[in-house]
Image: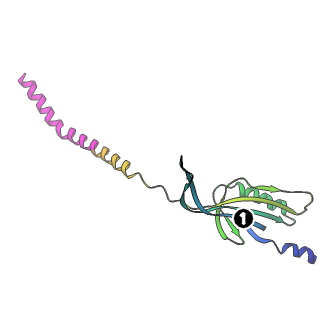
Amino acid sequence: MSGSLLSLLDDLYPAEFRGVEFEMPDSREETGRRVVRFFFPGRDDTWHEDLGAQDGNITVTGLIIGDDYVRRAGRMREAFRTPGPGLLIHPWLGELDVVLSQPAEISFTDKEIRLARFTATFEPWVERAPPPLDTLGLLLDILAELRAAARRLLRFILAPLRLAAAVIGAVGA
């Protein structure tokens, strides 16, 4: 490669998504706070409620360069179509578990031979704990089962007494 061509690659950083390597010329990350603004009738001022930190979307512009660019772009397409979280190795942010937050775009042009471009917007993946159990509902279900078991037990215990009472009543009549 000529010196001027190599200098063009100096601004590219290696990255990877689900095992598909690519070059990353730039990336954007949304970050900040989740703030809700409230308006009240008859008042000129507003109230802001801070709902905590927000790690937003990561938008990546990627280049797939080389003789095998069509094959690797196909692999990237399959990586984008795979459900669930995937590993993004980002040159500045490190290793991240992410999911696509919207469909990615892959483009080819006849003016750029051996080059495929893509843009993908990822969202950080956070493993969520299972929702807490409905303890009141669970307690009410247990109580209903206990009541039903107590009724069955009383019927079992009282059945011979009811039979004896029925026999005595029949004899007396």
Which span is picked out in magenta? 147-173
Q: How is the image coloured?
A: rainbow
Name above or below for residue 93 compared with residue 112.
below
**Mark 1 burial class by Cα count in 10 Å: few <14, some 14-19, many 20+:** few
Assess whether residue 71 is covered by the magenta stretch.
Answer: no
What residue is at 57 percent from the left and 58 percent from the top? 35
Name above or below for residue 91 compared with residue 129.
below
Residue with the most extreme top position: 173
Amino acid identity at mark 1: Arg
Specify whether 114 is left or right of 171.
Answer: right
What residue is at 69 percent from the left and 64 percent from the top? 29
What residue is at 80 percent from the left and 62 percent from the top? 72
Specify whether 135 is left or right of 72.
Answer: left
What residue is at 10 percent from the left and 24 percent from the top? 170
Q: Which residue is at the front of the view, 4 or 45?
A: 45
Q: Position of residue 157 (x, y in %)?
A: 18, 41
State the predominant SS element of the stretch in magenta.
helix
Name above or below for residue 102 compared with residue 160.
below
Q: Position of residue 99 (x, y in %)?
A: 65, 58
Specify whether 154 is left or right of 144.
Answer: left
Residue 29 visible to the viewer: yes
Q: Which residue is at the front of the view, 114 or 104?
A: 104
Q: Which residue is at the front of the view, 29 or 21?
A: 29
Q: Quadrant of the N terminus?
A: bottom right
Residue 20 visible to the viewer: no
User: Which quarter of the figure has residue 112?
Assistant: bottom right
Q: Position of residue 68 (x, y in %)?
A: 85, 64
Q: Quadrant of the C terminus?
A: top left
